[in-house]
Image: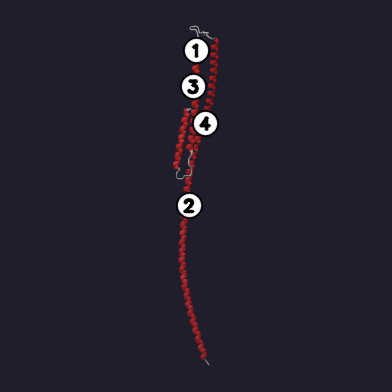
Amino acid sequence: MVEAFEDADEEASSLVEACDQEEEEEKPFEKTSSDCQPLVQRWRLRLFEQVERRDSQLQGLQALYEQYSECRRSLQAADANKRVPGTGYLVPKDVAEAKELHNAAEKLLRHKESQIQELQRHNKELLDELQRKELAHTHTCREATRLSQENGHLKATLGRLVAQQKRELQGELQEKELAHLETCREATRLAQENGHLKSELSRLQQRLRQQTDIEGSSEAQSNGDAGKGDGAMP
């Protein structure tokens, strides 16, 4: 029984250390916190309470057995004192008193024996219950260890996936930034080219207006000269 408690305590301690180590390794994520240590402490306290109850029952059983043994020794001593030396027969002092004492002693012995049997039965029930709880505690510790390890693997996998996705997003962002920069450069070039074209168009329009004005003046002058010629003729 003591070895079972020591094994359970060692397993609980290893579980607490595993949970602490897992918490230290998982600090970059800060998504979950381990509750293994409070669970193990509660189980340990319950087991210790069961041990204390069992020890108290055993102490009570031992005290009753000592009373029983002391009563037997007292009866044996009284019986030996009443026997005639060398014969083995009782000295008949007071038959009624002796019978009363004998009946009282037998009644007390039967009562003590029934108490001892009841305590033994109760102690067996407590031991069986304690054993079941020890097995359940061991199973719970193993399951907690398994879940803790599985949680660690899942978090490691999640960390790798997050890092991979982050790298992919960074690469995509860089590509978009380069494309945006190229678009901005092309837009700047087109704006400059558009400005040059507008300037060239403005110059051409101005030249065209000047040429149109010159041609209009020449045509008006020609028309004026022609009118003068027509007036001079008879």
The residue identified by callout 2 is 169
| Mark 1, secondary structure of its residue | helix
The tag on residue 78 is 1
Type of amino acid under label 4 = Lys
Which label sits in the foreground, 4 or 2? 4
Mark toward the start of the polypeptide (3 vs 2): 3
Q: How far is mark 1 from mark 4, CA to CA?
A: 48 Å
The residue identified by callout 4 is 133
Which label sits in the foreground, 3 or 2? 3
In the image, residue 181 lies at what x, y percent? Answer: 45, 59
Which label sits in the foreground, 2 or 1? 1
Mark toward the start of the polypeptide (4 vs 2): 4
In the image, residue 98 lies at what x, y percent? Answer: 53, 11
Which label sits in the foreground, 1 or 4? 1
**Total marks placed:** 4
Q: How far is mark 4 from mark 3, CA to CA?
A: 28 Å
Colour theme:
secondary structure
Type of amino acid under label 3 = Ala
The residue identified by callout 3 is 63
Mark toward the start of the polypeptide (3 vs 1): 3
Type of amino acid under label 1 = Ala
